Image: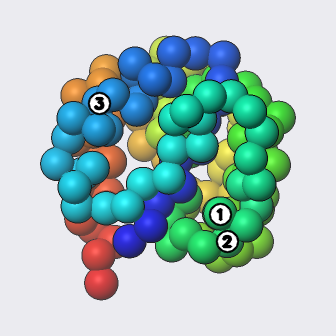
Amino acid sequence: MKIYLGHATTFDYQKDLYEPLKNSELWMQYKFFLPHEFGTEPINSKDIIASCEIFVAEVSYPSTGLGIELAWASTAACKMLCLVKENTKPSSSIRMITSNIIQYVDRGSLINKLSLWLDSIKG
């Protein structure tokens, strides 16, 4: 399964999101697309999202670009999951796009909860 991992760029996503994912078994089990793995230059994410089965969004931090990507994922009929870090307040609009919203405490719980969710949607 191809998974797009959307997120804001206003936090240390390399350390808090990409590193834990790359160090987990999920990295070997799924094909993840990390939009800012090699820098923050804009990419044509609309076409990439359309080619993915799953869109996972870390929505703890406000981001106009991520909001646009969420809309594209919804239009592309991707299965969607939003991850929210404990003690943050994501936009209430997220609930209009998906009811799949999971709260996590730290990097370890993020990976564990993502793994459980992915296991639950396997066909």
Q: CA distance from mark 2 to mark 1?
A: 5 Å
Quadrant that contains the N terminus: bottom left
> Which of marks 3 and 1 precedes in the sequence?
3
Compared with 2, 17 (above or below) is above
Compared with 86, 21 (above or below) is below
Q: Nearer the viewer, residue 42 or 80?
A: 42
Considering the numbered disc 2 on the image, is that residue within a helix, a strand or a loop?
helix
Q: Nearer the viewer, residue 10 or 96?
A: 10
Q: Amino acid at mark 2?
A: Ala
Quadrant of res 111: top left
Q: Amino acid at mark 1?
A: Ile
- Identify residue for label 1: 48
Q: Position of residue 25 (x, y in %)?
A: 17, 48
Q: CA distance from mark 3 to mark 2?
A: 25 Å
- Identify residue for label 3: 20
Which disc, if any, is residue 50? 2
How many residues crowd around disc 3 within 10 Å: few (fewer than 14), some, or many (20 or more)? Answer: some
Residue found farthest to the bottom: 123
Q: Position of residue 92 (x, y in %)?
A: 72, 38
Q: Say if mark 2 contacts mark 1, CB within 8 Å.
A: yes
